[in-house]
Amino acid sequence: MDPFVYLTGDRFPMIRDIGWNQVDEVYTHHDRLLDFDIFVFVTKGSMQVVEETVEYIIHEKEHLFLKKGLHHWGRPETLPGTSWYWIHFNSPVDDYSSYKDQSPLPEIDFFYPDHYAYRFPLPKHGTSPFHRTLENRLHLLVEDFGKPKEHGMVQLSIQVYQMFLELHKATKEHSQSTKNSGKGEAVAGRVMAFLKQHIDEDFDSTQLSSHLNLNYSYVSATFKTQTGLSIIEAHTKLRINKAIDWMRNTSLNVSEISERLGYRNPYYFSRVFKKVIGESPSSYMSNFYKNKSMKILLNR
């Protein structure tokens, strides 16, 4: 069974119900097959539940996701005094085949046509330092759920989505802190550092390979696995990101930006920009409100 559940960058989970429960006697989890997903967070004691053939014991300050369409049930093994929060929600996507498995790199995190078409994993079962904050957070969400207001369910869904994003980040950081960073991740980091240093020139695979003292085929394949991008794609997006930065924050024109980034001519730069962003540089620049007193920043 996949140890993760997934959400996407372009749609938030739609909340159906949220609440808290505590049992005063031995509890047996419901035997059911549902058409929505469930998030469970135990605040005290421990809960026993089986999904299909896999048994889970959710201890204090741990969570579990139960997936829609899978049979889950329990035995009378959840002890008196156990308490938990639960969220019932509909996942907006069933087929993830068109979504990338990697989120945009922070260094090139700007909008482009398929920017949000990625999925991110959440551990099906687990804990992290972030979980220590969840009880209070869920308490506030349950309180808010009981106060009818306009767009209340939408606001609640967005808040839960934000919580799940932070859960994703926290568990990823916790996993990295409890083990040495993988060799592949280290290689990808070195590649990105090299690309940023050479943002104002065309990509040279031989130069990169020599700089890293590694075979380029290995470097290229490793980078693709880690980031979902080819090295050339990452380099191009870094250059376009710098172009966007200059467009927004300086008075440089398209020709000047093209020259500073090392493109052979502004026409070629414009073709590359449109391929990445979906519109020409001049069209993109026309969308900004610019300060007339803006100065050219030569050292950005």
Image (cartoon, rainbow, N blue to C red):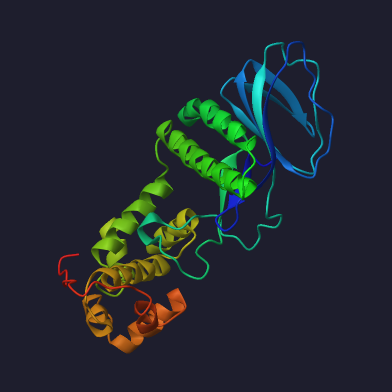
Residue 20 in the image: x percent, y percent? 66, 26
Is residue 163 left or right of 213 when viewed as pictured? right
Residue 132 in the image: x percent, y percent? 49, 25
Quadrant the C terminus occupies? bottom left
Q: Is residue 11 above or below residue 40?
A: below
Residue 119 in the image: x percent, y percent? 57, 54
Q: Is residue 153 above or below residue 194?
A: above
Identify which residue is drawn at 33% across, 82% down.
Answer: 269
Q: Is residue 54 above or below residue 255?
A: above
Number of on-image labels:
0
Quadrant the N terminus occupies? top right
Q: Is residue 71 above or below residue 154?
A: above
Is residue 2 left or right of 217 when viewed as pictured? right
Residue 120 in the image: x percent, y percent? 55, 49
Which image quadrant is residue 126 in? top right
Identify which residue is drawn at 50% across, 64% down.
Answer: 115
Which image quadrant is residue 109 in? bottom left
